Image: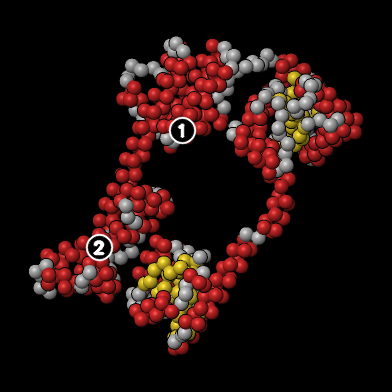
């Protein structure tokens, strides 16, 4: 159902058109009717219709001025012009406005319906074109290799939720289900800049061939000028993953040297049991690769051979940090408690040394304090000048005690940030209202001028203004001007056109129209009823 606004200064036209046409039957919903361009523009800004049907000759703002304003602010809105024979040549000159259709007055309901159907068919066609599944599928198919590479790279550099990883893996046709995972990275030992990308691509092809020949459960892709080999262990596979990596990586290394006449060094990370921990194995593979400066090129280097890696350790990774910060800044208490529960469940489930545990707590507490610092909170005021939150790490008698303390600290910071945000919203709205009271007499005051003064975007301002005042800025400005006008009518002998100028209207007739519509009586009637004679 397309939304429509009908604009005409003749009431019988508005009423007749709205009653004679089965709007819903033709796929339209009439949101509102306006009797002049200025009123219509306010409605367009508030209601965002799909179609505006407007007369040309109207008071305060004619149809072409309205069309120009709508085109500038809402270019997707369709415009149908209603015009008399004597105005048609004038209307045709407005082709730069890209008017969608014209209807010549006098017109019948059938003629307007024909035009509406034309416009609707065009909108339907454009919508169908955008949603054409075949075109989208073809475009998606062509983009799939690139999307797949981006996804695989993200597995190494970002902490993604398991559900998201598996969902995207299915979407991109990547098999990632397994009980264990191991990452290795291969780099060219000779840096030939003019041939490097070609050689890397050749190494990738050789690696893919070896994966297929050996029937390994592996994926090969390029990332940061490295060839990455990701092996996974399937449920029925009894062979150790490290041994599989040893066999395939060694064969790749020998084949590259034989057929490409270059050598590669392979760094092998640690085995991990959760697909979300792939960044750890990748990081360890990179660390192993660094040892080629000591051990030499053209070889396999396992991180477990050169560095003792803790098997059961907790890591405060990017995903955990992001979730904790998000909850403190914008989450709810249940969300916060769920995130903290997850942080400490990792400690309870793992065989963690006291050293690793304290480092883990230190990372959590540092993140919390940095979040408070960025929010410009006074920690001394919140927790006391003698409080040393980082030092508390060594004083907890149990994991549960530490968890309770972290929850308590986060709750206080969360509350302070929420309170500060509300204060910021209120301060911005107060500043906007103050600005509006200072400038309501200016005919060109607008939401954009207010936002320019406050240095914020109109979209952001509109949302917080409505949240705080329960009304839109346009409505607030109108109410303010009308209240000022009523005050001047009660307390002065100024003429109506002079009052119009003093409250920001350049057109006295339009002021009178707005006043009657807002107050329910004319300015003269209001003044007489208030005991002031004009």
One can see residue 378 in this view: yes
Q: SS class of the residue under badge 1?
A: helix
Where is 464 relative to 506, above or below? above
Residue 231 x, y percent position in the rendering: 75, 29
Query: Which mark identifies residue 335?
Result: 1
In this rendering, does residue 376 appear at all? no
Q: Quadrant of the C terminus?
A: bottom left
Nearer the observer, 364 or 94: 364
Q: Which mark is residue 513?
A: none
> Marks 2 and 1, how far apart in space?
45 Å
Residue at left offset 23%, top offset 64%? 482
- Residue furthest right in the image: 258
Could you tell me residue 155's position as x and y percent?
Answer: 66, 34
Eyeballing the image, is 151 above or below 3? Answer: above
Name the residue rendered at 70%, 43% in the picture: 172
Residue 497 on image: x %, y %: 22, 73
In the rendered view, does 434 fall on the left or right side of 213? left
Secondary structure beneath label 2: helix
Question: Circle 2 is placed at which residue position?
Answer: 481
Q: Residue at x 47, y 82 (%)?
A: 109
Q: Position of residue 190 (x, y in %)?
A: 80, 30
């Amino acid at each position: 159902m397309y939304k429509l606004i009908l604009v005409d200064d003749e009431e019988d036209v508005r009423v007749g058109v709205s009653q004679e046409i089965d709007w819903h039957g033709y796929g339209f919903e009439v949101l509102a009717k306006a009797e002049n361009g200025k009123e219509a523009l306010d409605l367009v800004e508030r209601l965002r219709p799909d179609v505006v049907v407007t007369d040309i000759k109207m008071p305060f703002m004619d149809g072409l001025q309205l069309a120009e304003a709508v085109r500038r602010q809402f270019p997707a809105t369709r415009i149908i012009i209603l015009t008399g024979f004597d105005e048609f040549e004038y209307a045709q000159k407005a082709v730069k406005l890209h008017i969608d259709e014209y209807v010549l007055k006098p017109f019948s309901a059938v003629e307007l319906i024909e035009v509406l159907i034309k416009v609707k068919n065009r909108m339907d066609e454009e919508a169908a074109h955008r949603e054409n599944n075949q075109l989208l599928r073809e475009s998606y198919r062509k983009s799939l290799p690139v999307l797949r590479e981006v996804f695989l790279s993200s597995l190494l550099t970002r902490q993604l939720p398991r559900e998201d990883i598996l969902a995207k893996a299915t979407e991109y046709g990547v098999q990632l289900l397994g009980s264990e995972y191991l990452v290795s990275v291969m780099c060219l030992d000779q840096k030939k800049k003019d041939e490097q990308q070609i050689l890397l691509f050749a190494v990738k092809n050789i690696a893919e061939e070896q994966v297929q020949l050996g029937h390994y459960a592996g994926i090969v892709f390029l990332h940061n000028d490295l060839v990455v080999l990701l092996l996974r262990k399937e449920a029925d596979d009894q062979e150790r993953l490290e041994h599989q990596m040893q066999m395939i990586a060694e064969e790749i290394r020998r084949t590259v040297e034989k057929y490409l006449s270059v050598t590669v060094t392979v760094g092998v990370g640690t085995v991990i049991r959760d697909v979300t921990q792939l960044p750890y194995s990748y990081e360890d593979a990179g660390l192993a690769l660094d040892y080629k400066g000591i051990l030499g090129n053209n070889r396999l280097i396992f991180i477990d051979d050169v560095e003792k890696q803790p098997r059961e350790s907790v890591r405060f990774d990017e995903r955990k940090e992001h979730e904790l910060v998000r909850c403190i800044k914008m989450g709810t208490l249940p969300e916060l408690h769920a995130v903290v529960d997850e942080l400490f469940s990792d400690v309870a489930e793992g065989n963690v040394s006291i050293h690793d545990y304290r480092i883990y707590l230190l990372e959590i507490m540092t993140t919390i304090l940095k979040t408070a610092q960025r929010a410009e909170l006074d920690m001394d005021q919140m927790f006391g000048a003698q409080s040393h939150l980082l030092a508390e790490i060594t004083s907890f008698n149990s994991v549960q005690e530490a968890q309770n303390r972290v929850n308590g600290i986060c709750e206080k910071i969360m509350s302070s940030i929420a309170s500060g945000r509300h204060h910021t919203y209120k301060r911005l709205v107060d500043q906007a209202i103050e600005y509006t009271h200072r400038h309501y007499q200016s005919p060109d005051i607008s939401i954009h001028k207010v936002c320019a003064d406050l240095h914020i975007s109109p979209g952001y301002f509109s949302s917080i203004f409505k949240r705080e005042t329960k009304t839109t800025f346009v409505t607030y400005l109108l109410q303010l001007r009308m209240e000022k006008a009523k005050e001047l009518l009660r307390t002065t002998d100024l003429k109506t056109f002079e009052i119009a100028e003093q409250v920001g209207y350049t057109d006295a007739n339009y002021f009178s129209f707005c006043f009657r519509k807002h107050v329910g009586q004319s300015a003269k009637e209001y003044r007489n009823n208030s005991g002031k004679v004009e």
